[in-house]
Amino acid sequence: MLRSRCRPYPSCLWWRNTPCRSSCIWQHVPLRSYVRAHKGVEEVAPEDQSRTKVSLRSWRKRTFNCLIVVRRFATTSALAASSVPSLLLARGHQISTVPEVPLVISSKAFEGAAVAKTSAALKLLKAVGAGPDVDKVYGSRKLRAGKGKLRGRRHRQRRGPLVVYNPDEDGKELVHAFRNIPGVETSSVFSLNLLQLAPGGHLGRFIIWTSSAFAALDEIYGSTTTPSALKKDFLLPSNVVHNADISRLINSSEVQAVLRGPKGGPLTKRASVQKKNPLKNKQVLLRLNPYAKAFSEKKLGSEKLDQGEPKRAAESFANVLHED
C-alpha cells in the first residue's frame, strides 16, 4: 500500500470513512470526527471498546475539582496567618516600620477618589510604613533563567503588599492607582483570591485593609458560632488546641502531677546481648584481657628482642651428627 510522504496514512477517502480498521490498535477507537470537544472517548465508543491508554485530546487536564469547604478553610487560614508578624517576616516582607499587623487604613482616605493616581498611592504607602516593602520589590527584579524569557515572562520579582478594599464604599478608583506599582496587588474583600493571599503556597502575605473591608469580614465569614450571611451554612473553623506549644504543655505542673512514674529500675536489661568485636571495641577487649591496657601503653608489641648474636655450636655437636 502506497503512503504519502507528508502523511503517515494514505490520503484516499476510503481510509477516512472506514469506521473500524481490523488488525490495528485503532480498531476499537472511534474516529476523530466522531468525538466532539465536550465529549470524551468513553461517551462515544461502544461499551468495553474505549481506548484508555492514550487520549484523543490534544490538551491536558491540569486542574482538578476541590471541595468548596476546603477552599474556604484555606482562605480563612491564609487570612489568619496574615496577622502573625513572624510569618510575615519569614516570608520576606519588610514590616519593621509598620505600626501594627494587620494594618487597617480608614476608608475616609479614599473618599471622593482621593487615591486615583499612582503618586498618591505611593505617598499613602510610605505614610503607613509600607515603603520599605515596596522598595524591596524594586530591587528584586531580575532576569528569569531558562526559556521562560521567550514565553512572556522575561523578568521575575518578589511580591509586595496586598490592598484589600470594599468596592461598595471605597470605590474602584484605587485599583488604577495601585496597579502600576510593582509587586502591589489589589483585591475586593468579596472575592479574595487564595493565590494572592498565599503566593506559592506560603502563608504570611502582608495585607493592607481598608476599614470598611475589615468590617465586612464578619458579614462574609461569620464567626465560630454565628454562620456567615453570604456563605450558606459556613462557620469559621475553631481551634483544636488553644496553646500550640506542646513542650510547654507536657512540662507544665498540672500535667506532670497526674503522670505515672517510669516503669522498672534506673537500669534496664536488654533482652538480647549485642555481640561486639573486641578488636574494635576497647571496653570489650579490656573485659577479656585486662593486660591489654598495659601492653598498649608500654608498646611492648613494637619492641625488638636484644639478645646479641647467636652462639656457634660446639665441635662435640658436629661429632655426634657424624657418628654412625
Image (spheres, grey):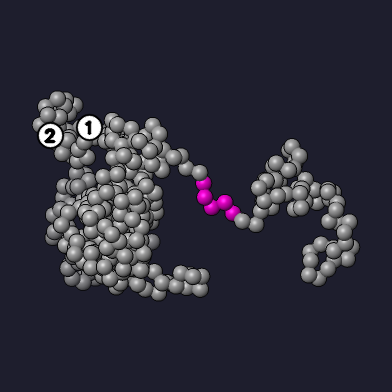
Amino acid type of the residue that numbered disc 1 sits on in the rendered structure? Lys
Give the number of the mark in front: 2 or 1.
Answer: 2
Q: 292 or 170, which is in the foreground? A: 170
Q: Does residue 256 appear in this view?
A: yes
The label on residue 134 is: none
Q: Secondary structure at mark 1?
A: loop
Side of 245 relative to 200 (left or right)? left
Where's residue 148, x and y in %?
48, 70
Side of 199 relative to 263 (left or right)? right
Q: 9 or 193, which is in the foreground? A: 193
The label on residue 269 is: 1
Let me know if residue 62 is in the magenta part: yes
Quadrant for the N terminus, please: bottom right
Q: Does residue 316 appear in this view?
A: no
Residue 217, placed above or below residue 204: above
Q: Main secondary structure of the magenta part?
A: loop
Amino acid type of the residue that numbered disc 2 sits on in the rendered structure? Ser
Please report whichever mark, 2 or 1, sits nearer to the chain's N-terminal start. 2
Q: Residue at x 81, y 62 (%)?
A: 9
Q: Residue at x 38, y 41 (%)?
A: 72
Q: What's the magenta region?
A: 60-64
Q: Secondary structure at mark 2?
A: loop
Where's residue 113, x and y in %?
30, 61
Q: 2 or 239, which is in the foreground? A: 239
Where's residue 195, x and y in %?
39, 54
Q: Residue at x 13, y 54 (%)?
A: 294
Residue 123, placed above or below residue 293: below
Q: Quadrant of residue 144?
A: bottom left
Where's residue 307, x and y in %?
17, 67
Q: Residue furthest front?
A: 112
- Count how many numbered circles sit on residues in the image: 2
The label on residue 252 is: 2
